[in-house]
Structure formats: C-alpha cells, structure tokens
Amino acid sequence: MAFKILIAEDEEITLKHLSYALEKEGNAVTGVKNGIDALKIIEKEEFDILISDIKMPGIDGLTLLAEVKDKHPNIEVIIITGFGSIESAVEAMKRGATDYITKPFNLDELNLKINKVQEKKRLENENIALKVSLGLDKDAPFIAKSKVMKRLTDVIKSITNSDCNVLLTGESGVGKGLVAKIIHYTGARKDRSFLALNCAIFTEELLASELFGHERGAFTGAVSSKQGLLEVADKGTLFLDEIAEMPPNLQAKLLKVIEDKEFLRVGGTRSIRVDVRIIAATNQNIKALLSEGKFREDLYYRLNVMDIYIPPLRERKEDIAPLGKHFLERHSKKANKKIEGFSREAMDMLMSYGFPGNVRELENIIERAVILEKTSRIRPETLPQSIKLFQIETIDPNRIKPIDDLNREYAEKVLEFAEGNKSKAAELLGISRTSLWRILKK
C-alpha cells in the first residue's frame, strides 16, 4: 500500500536522502524545508503521513504537530528528533504523534515504523467498515435451487476475476444486498472493505456527507473533518442501494469519481484519490427513469457494465422450501427453541403464497412463526392471516378439491370443535344427524 508522505526537514541533504529512500519503497513523497510551507501544502493536498523534524525555522515540529492534529486528524505524524532530545519526542507522542525516530536514523527502522502506520490505518478503516456494515455477514448463505437462480450464480462466477462495476435490479426484498456481498467476497477485493449505503434514507446534504465525507465547518454541526464511505472503502467495494433515489447533483459527482477516481470532500479543496468498485442496485424501472431524464444516462452506462436481474420469489418457488428451512434454523437458534420443520399444510400454504415482499417477507413470516409456535413444527395456525386470506382469494388448479371432500373436512373440524358430540355438531351445521353421518362416510 503506497502512501502520500510529506517531509518537513530543514537540512537539505537529509530531506533528499529521506525522499529518495521512501520513493524507492513506492510512496509518493513531497518535501518542504519548514513548517510554514508544510501547513500551506497540507491545505491544498491530502497526505497520509507527515514526517517532521522537531527543530525547524518559522514554526517548530511540535507547533506543526498541533496544527495538523487540530485541522487534519487523519494525518499520521512521525517526529524526527536528535538523540539528546528524547524528552521532546515523548512530548510529541503526548500531543498526538504516531511515533518518533532519532537522528542519525536507520532507514530500515523508519520503513518499519511506516509499515506500522500502514497497518494502523488498515485496521482503522476495517473498524469503520465494520460499524457501517453491521449485519452484513459475508458468510450469509445463497439459496439457489431454482434454475433461474442457478443461472444467476453462473453469471456471478463469470465475473469473479473481473473488477467491473455492477448494476443489480429487481423488486424490493429479493436479495440484492446479499448478491452484492457475494460478488464482493468471491472477487479480487474480498480481503478489503465492503460498505453499503442506502441512497433513499438521507437528505441530499447528509447523503453527500456520508458518501464524500466533509471538512470541519463545511456545514452547521460539522465540528471536525470526517471520511466519507468512498474514502473508507478505498481498494474495496461500495454498495449503493436504491441508486435511483440519488439526486442529480450527486449523480454527477459520483460519475466523476468513477471516471477520474478522485473527489473532494464537502467543503474541501483537496482532491482525494480512491480505487473503489461500485455495485449499485435499484428496484425501479431504470430505463423509464432514463427516458424521463430522472437518471443520468452517462452514469447508467458506467454502472451498467454488468447488469444482473434478480427475479421475485414468486417466479422461483423451488427456493421457498430451502430458504424457509434456513430461516427456521436461524430464528429457532436465536429464540432458543427446538423447531424441527414445517407441517405439510404449513409448507403448502407457503408454497402457494405470492410473497409480494419477496425473500425479506418470507424471513419475517418465519421469524414470527418461531416466536408463536409452541410445538416442534411450524403449523398453519402460526402463519399470518394474510397467507390464509391469500389462499382463499387464489385458485390453484393443483389444489382444487371435490365438494364432497371439502364438506367432509369441514364436518370433521366442526365435530372436533363439538368434542365428538354428533348431535351438537349436526345442530351447528344445520343438518340432521343422519346427514352428518352420510357426509362423514363419503
């Protein structure tokens, strides 16, 4: 991982020596001879590390450290000090310096300290990523029993070695977020951050701040600088859900990031370079939005290098049973219950249901049933009323029964309700005991 490093050192020979050695390691190095010039260039450019001598003309290293940590807290600072000035180095560490090195210094030791900074930054980004993506489990299962989902799996496998941007389309709840995770964790960036941002839940100002970050004072409440998700996801993947909800102004800025691989924070003047793979998703008709001028055509073609459509659950009923089993195992464990499966009637009801909310609705139904169920199998009684009403309103040719069968089933249930008292059951049905006997015998 190459760094952008700024060296502030008033001894020209030392400055040249350091610059050459650090550039040889693949870093981008800029050198200045005093703290004032260092502050000026930091206002114009973004740096990862500042290496500063503690004694310089103009402003000394400790003053420079304080200024940098106040305005640019993300910059790591390594202080250079003379062998007899260890007290100054200790003071620098107290004020926020990452490390120090003494003159005359060993270049291997300096590179080791820079590697430590690199590891520190990597862990910080992973921690930020973890906080942002809580609930996004890279080991989440992908149920693909139906032919259409197996074809989708083949498409995902075909782009394993590609780094192309992807546009996922499909109804709400079909699993676009899960597919995005699978694409990331089976690709070349699998060891890097995977972050997700829902573009529909923020105002334009907040969405810009979440995406690009902001500088201190950029708007009311911006009391300190903040990294955006594009910055945190550098070398990784950013999943932009509900991309069609992104305002036109931000669409243009995102296009610039994709094309130029750089952007400005909100309120910032320094370009920040990033290498991020974009996976976007929408449940809207993107072609209709293009024709209406509500979505930028140039951005669409940048995102749509690979278009993957995820069909609704009602079009892949073979996936209902295995998905149901998975969700049952997950929520039974969470509820500390031993529920082994579904009764045949309960599974038949699920198989015949239309699932307007798709996979997300199926999981919600199973979670509710687990909470309510008191036996070892999910029964129709613990499924929502909406499924039962759907069954009444929907005629499935494969489930049509003869009238005699329906009459018998109904009579049996009424008899059960009457606790086996046939006279009472006949009275409830409005028929004679003889008629009830005939219905039960058919």
Image (cartoon, grey):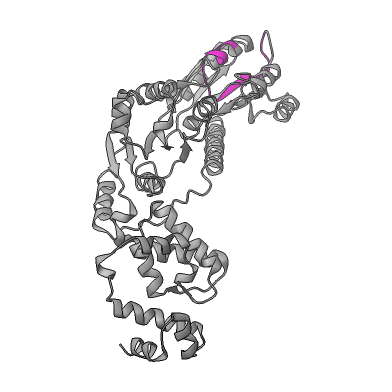
Tell me if 291 is positioned left or right of 78 in this view: left
In magenta stretch: residue 247 = no
Q: Is residue 234 visible?
A: yes
- Please report the residue visible at 40 percent of the width from the left and 64 percent of the height from the top: 324
The quadrant of the picture occupied by the N terminus is top left
**Of 335 and 25, the residue lying toward us:** 335
Which quarter of the figure has residue 248? top left
Query: Residue 20 appears at what percent x and percent y?
Result: 46, 20
Query: Residue 441 appears at what percent x and percent y?
Result: 33, 90
Q: Which residues are magenta?
A: 40-57
Which quarter of the figure has residue 406? bottom left
Q: Is residue 276 visible?
A: no
**Of 216 and 320, the residue lying toward us:** 320
Query: Residue 319 appears at what percent x and percent y?
Result: 33, 60
- In the rendered view, would you say 144 is above or below 268? below
In magenta stretch: residue 51 = yes
Total numbered badges shown on the rendered structure: 0
- In the rendered view, would you say 421 is above or below 277? below
**Of 150 and 360, the residue lying toward us:** 360
The quadrant of the picture occupied by the C terminus is bottom left
Query: Residue 418 appears at what percent x and percent y?
Result: 51, 85
**Of 83 and 178, the residue lying toward us:** 178
- In the rendered view, would you say 401 is above or below 267? below
